[in-house]
Amino acid sequence: MNDRDALPGLAPLFEPPYYAVIFTSLRTTVDAGYGEMAERMVALAAEQPGYLGVESTRGADGLGITVSYWQSLEAIQAWRAVAEHRAARDQGRADWYRHYALRIARVERSYGWSRADGVEDPTLR
């Protein structure tokens, strides 16, 4: 494990190819258990076959971006079909989100840098 793998909030780098599900949302002011449900969805996703990791952030203005990483399109489709996830999606539309957009992308290449790596450009490795 390198320094980058241990950073809180950052998913480790995975061996490409893999898939990224990019969920961008704008929240309402309704709380109604949102934080608990968000934590539950992360934990539930982590139990699914093909799940690799997640990164998520939300600003004070309600704009959030969550990127989950998956081994295959089939794993993403299976996650979409999980009943508890479907129920959370329905509640999100009813209570928590003013808008959301979902994008699925195939990751062909990934690299990173950490201060512990020195000043060398990681793309030259």
Image: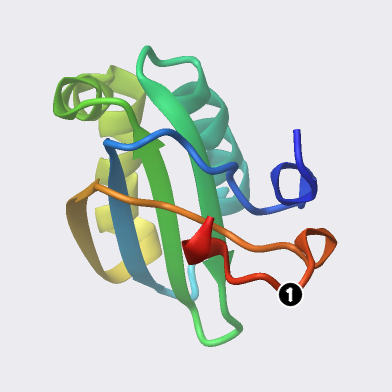
Which residue does the numbered mark 1 point to in the structure image?
119
Q: Amino acid under label 1? A: Val
Left or right: 65 as drawn, with respect to 39: left
Can you say which quadrant of the picture contains the N terminus? top right
The answer to whether 106 is drawn above or below residue 115 in the figure is above
Name the spot of residue 28 as percent of width and height, x first.
Answer: 41, 74
Name the spot of residue 31 as percent of width and height, x first.
Answer: 55, 61
- Work out whether residue 24 or residue 72 is closer to the camera in this orientation and state it: 72
Determine the residue positioned at 15% across, 21% down. 74
Name the spot of residue 67 as percent of width and height, x first.
Answer: 41, 53
For the residue labelled by badge 1, is the local secondary structure a helix, a strand or a loop? loop
- Work out whether residue 15 or residue 38 is closer to the camera in this orientation and state it: 15
Determine the residue positioned at 54% across, 52% down. 55
Determine the residue positioned at 46% across, 29% down. 52
The answer to whether 67 is drawn above or below residue 39 in the figure is below
**Which quarter of the picture shows residue 15?**
top left
